Image (spheres, coloured by chain):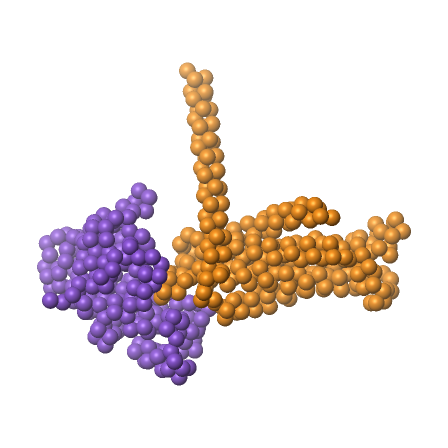
């Protein structure tokens, strides 16, 4: 039996009187790629931020690689984060650093033995996303799609066991969205990562995931493959596949 | 009936004012408590390895070097104007020869540090506030945290330390340039040699003028960096938050300069 490496139980999160996540339960097995679909404002980004400890859950538990996130101190969290990659919605490239420096940034805690090795790691990461030529550019000189690809290269540079993608195709045209979705799939296969993809783009979910979970009003309302969910009778699920 | 309604509405108005007043007071104390936590965290992270030397050096270069020209021009004008404005009064009392000493003491003790700090708050404080707020809005701070890098240490500690150490250096430069501006101002009306002018400047300047004024500039720099970082780091999401952060960093940074100056003057007066 494949091992479960992400386990969420009865997760609750509110902001004041606004209940965002009311009861989220989810298990993700090693090597699986799960897309979490939901309308805007249903708490998808809040969920993913709770998973990496950027937000603290009010109730419930989040187990990642066998450790309960809420029990960990800062050092413990950082240990777990070393095994996690995160692609932010806006790519979150550091504006004041070049593409090369952006990619070198996560390696600060794991400095390679030599300058040549560092260079090779950065070039490999950029080669993966077909952006070798952008190595000395500033983020402001890149297009939205290029920024996402550099963000993907940066989040994969430490070859993480788990990848979280927060709306990877938001703000991109349909062609670039497909390219990014295929790139995500390619990287998953290459590095054998377990992934959670937060999206409202069904096409991205279809290409890059092998299981989908639909959340609405802070709870998981449906779960299954693309084929299974596209036949669902639930109107909130149906709305995504029409 | 009408009178009773009027009375009720006045009572309601007083109640609403009270409610608003207590909310403002609560907000103020919350902000003070959060700022205190921020300061304590700064000192905790400052002495904890790993140390971000390269980022500190980069920020010091940016903060010091990029403010230098503006500070230099303002200081020169400040010295020149102060001399031109003071001259007629001193001439009236036959104390014209006191002009270099008087201007030098004014500049070194008060005007140099305060004006430089205000310019610094406007240029550097707002820049830090806007930069950090923009990093917060575009999730760059979150990205650092997820990479296992302490954003507080990397962004906040380095910037506060840089402003604390760079402002005193800028004030030294500003004082020197302002005194040179004064020499230029004196020579617009009469001919005084460089040697004689500076002899008169240093005749009246002593340790009690220079040392307390120099020490307070560290506190000015710390306050400006602290306010800029605190406001930017805790900015609301959205582009509106970036503008608000830049604006608040200047307003509260400048206010802190005057508060620190008032306290510094009171403390200095105990020893002189």
> In this picture, is B167 found above or below B2?
below
> Which residue is depicted at the point 27% across and 46% down?
A19
| Chain that is coloured purple in the picture | A
User: Residue extending furthest right?
Assistant: B94
Depth order, front residue of B199/A167: B199
Depth order, front residue of B185/B172: B172
Q: Quadrant of the N terminus of chain A?
A: bottom left
Whether residue A15 is visible: yes
Left or right of B113 in this view: A79: left
Left or right of A159 in this view: B219: right
Left or right of B66 in this view: B271: right
Picture quarter containing residue A78? Answer: bottom left
Q: Position of residue B41 (x, y in %)?
A: 46, 55
> In this picture, is B18 found above or below A217?
above
Q: Position of residue B8 (x, y in %)?
A: 43, 22
**Visual hue assigned to chain B:** orange
Picture quarter containing residue A29? Answer: bottom left
């Amino acid at each position: 039996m494949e091992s479960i490496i992400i386990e969420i139980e009865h997760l609750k999160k509110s902001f004041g009187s606004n209940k965002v996540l009311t009861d989220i339960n989810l298990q993700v097995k090693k090597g699986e790629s799960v897309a979490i679909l939901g309308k805007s404002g249903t708490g998808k980004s809040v969920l993913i931020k709770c998973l990496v400890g950027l937000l603290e859950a009010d109730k419930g538990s989040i187990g990642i690689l066998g450790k309960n996130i809420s029990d960990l101190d800062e050092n413990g969290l950082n240990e777990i984060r070393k095994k996690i990659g995160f692609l932010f919605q806006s790519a979150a490239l550091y504006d004041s650093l070049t593409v090369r420096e952006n990619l070198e940034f996560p390696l600060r805690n794991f400095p390679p033995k030599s300058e040549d090795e560092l260079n090779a790691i950065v070039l490999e990461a950029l080669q993966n996303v077909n952006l070798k030529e952008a190595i000395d550019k500033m983020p402001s000189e890149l297009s939205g799609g290029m920024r996402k690809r550099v963000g993907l290269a940066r989040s994969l540079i430490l070859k993480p066991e788990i990848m979280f993608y927060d709306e990877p195709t938001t703000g991109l045209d349909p062609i670039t969205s497909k390219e990014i979705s295929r790139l995500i799939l390619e990287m998953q296969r290459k590095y054998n990562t377990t992934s959670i993809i937060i999206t409202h783009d069904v096409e991205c979910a279809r290409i890059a995931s092998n299981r989908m979970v639909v959340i609405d009003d802070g709870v998981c309302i449906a779960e299954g493959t693309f084929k299974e969910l596209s036949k669902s009778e639930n109107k909130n699920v149906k709305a995504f596949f029409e | 009936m009408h009178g009773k309604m009027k009375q009720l509405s006045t009572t309601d108005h007083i109640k609403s004012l009270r409610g608003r007043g207590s909310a403002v007071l609560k907000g103020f104390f919350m902000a003070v408590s959060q700022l205190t936590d921020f300061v304590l965290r700064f000192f905790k992270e400052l002495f904890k390895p790993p140390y971000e030397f390269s980022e500190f050096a980069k920020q010091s270069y940016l903060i010091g070097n990029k403010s230098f020209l503006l500070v230099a021009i303002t200081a020169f004008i400040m010295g020149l104007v102060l001399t031109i404005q003071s001259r007629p009064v001193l001439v009236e009392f036959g104390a014209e020869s006191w002009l270099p000493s008087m201007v030098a003491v004014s500049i070194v003790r008060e005007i140099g540090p305060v004006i430089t700090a205000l310019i610094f708050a406007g240029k550097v404080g707002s820049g830090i506030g806007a930069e950090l707020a923009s990093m917060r809005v575009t999730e760059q701070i979150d990205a650092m945290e997820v990479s296992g890098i302490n954003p507080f240490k990397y962004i906040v500690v380095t910037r506060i330390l840089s402003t604390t150490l760079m402002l005193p250096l800028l004030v030294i430069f500003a004082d020197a340039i302002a005194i040179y501006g004064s020499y230029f101002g004196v020579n617009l009306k009469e001919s005084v040699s460089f040697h004689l002018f500076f002899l008169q400047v240093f005749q009246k300047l002593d340790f009690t003028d220079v040392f307390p004024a120099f020490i307070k500039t560290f506190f000015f720099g710390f306050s400006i960096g602290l306010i800029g970082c605190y406001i930017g780091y805790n900015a609301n999401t959205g582009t509106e938050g970036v503008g608000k952060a830049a604006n608040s960093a200047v307003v509260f940074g400048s206010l802190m300069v005057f508060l620190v100056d008032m306290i510094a003057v009171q403390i200095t007066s105990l020893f002189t």
